[in-house]
Image (cartoon, coloured by chain):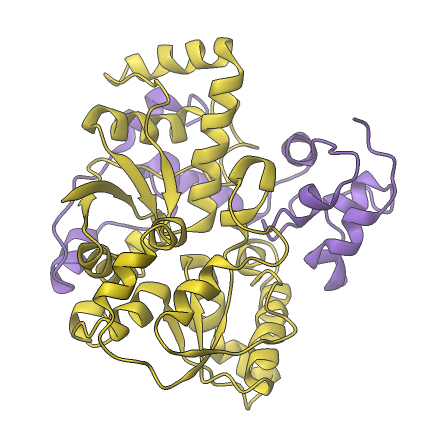
Chain colours: A purple, B yellow
Amino acid sequence: MDCTKCSICRSRCLVERLGGASITSVLNEAAEKGAWNCSNCWKCIDACPQEFDIYNAIIEKRRLEEAPRAYREAFAGICRNGYIFPIEELNTIREMWGLNKIELVGPEVIRKLIKEC
Amino acid sequence: MEQRLLFPGCLILARFQQYELAAKAVLAKLGIEAVDMQAVACCASSIVPPFSVDWVNLPAYNLSLAERQGFDIVTLCGSCTRTLRLTQEMLARDAGLKETVNRSLAAVGLAYQGTAKVSHLIEVISSKMEEVGKSFRQKLDMRVSLSHPCNVMRPSQVMKFDDPWEPKKLREIVHATGARVVDYDQEYECCGATLLMVSEDWAIRAALAKLKSATLAGAEAMVVSCGNCFLVLKSMQDKVRKIEPGISLPVIFLPQIIGLSFGIDKKALGLEQ
């Protein structure tokens, strides 16, 4: 179903409540940009009476907007070693907690799966 | 003993080892061995999709690792749970996409079929309430507030678990510890952790709203069951206090509070190192 610009999603959005513009502003033509401004709570999707595909709208709109630095760095981390966060000392830390060492995925596998890496 | 693969997710793997430790200890009491997932990668979360048309390969890779071992998955993070379940739904719906994904997975010696069930820790524990009752040893004399992990219930068409607006399952589990669950007006609001990626100010203000509301309601601690909630509600409390100096609320992972009621040693729950 199409978005009817009813703004119900905006009324549920945390970013909007904090004074920002999110995908819900973009869909309701209240802002041109904001697709990256999202808390990942997905209340907009559950609130939508039209069952509009907001998830894919977010992905499409994000591809048209410049990604925030933290997202670019997170993606670079995934390409580098398969994880968002630095995990170089992971098995040493796990040992300190009494957790077993684990095998890490490595960049070769990631490059075969994600060609943009 | 039943076995499940533990999918910790990047954040818990890198920073919150106490959550993994406590989850394993509690699951063991419930008759489930949480097996480490070797060569596991990031779930893809909401991070990878805008950057890559192949993003679904990454969660499909993780799911196919579990299938190869023949185990279902237990997750600790809301976002990982949603991403893995969304991937399963996409691949079940679209045979062409599944074929494309399987061509990519063949390059790393794997294949996706769609046989591994993915459940968050809340779902697993709530399906074992009889065992929870049997392992109960001591009533916890404390007042706690709850922070529900958004992505375990939403989007409800994908997650199909609990009430997406006022979830009940976490409350039922925490009730079983004897702790008193305190209602607060921000209980069903998102913690805001993901906003750290775009605006620290927004994330801190979202966390402040929850922490302040829970404190005013008389909570002595907040129970979380997602690494992202812990990150903003606990690890960022110093920054919250710069706006509201009086805020100081202990934050505890779900298996830690259950483990205390089971009489498990604090060190084995990651509450003392």
Between B199 and B164, the one nearer to me in the picture: B164
Q: Residue B108 in the image: x percent, y percent?
A: 26, 18
Residue B273 in view: no
Residue B92 coordinates in the image, percent (x, y):
48, 19
Residue B212: horizontal and vertical position, in percent?
59, 81
Give B249 or B109, whichever is nearer the viewer: B249
Name the side, left or right, on which B149 lies relative to B108: right
Q: Is residue B245 visible?
A: yes
Residue B124 in the image: above or below residue B237: above
Q: Residue B114 appears in which quarter of the rendering? A: top left
Residue at 13% across, 45% down: B1
Query: Residue drawn 32% across and 17% down?
Result: B105
In x, y percent, where is residue B194? Answer: 54, 54
Left or right: residue B107 versus residue B181 is left
Residue toward you, B131 or B46: B131
Residue B101 higher or lower than B12, as above or below: above
Quarter where residue A26 is shown: top right
Q: Is residue B197 above or below residue B100?
A: below
Please name the residue shown 55% across and 57% down the image: B167
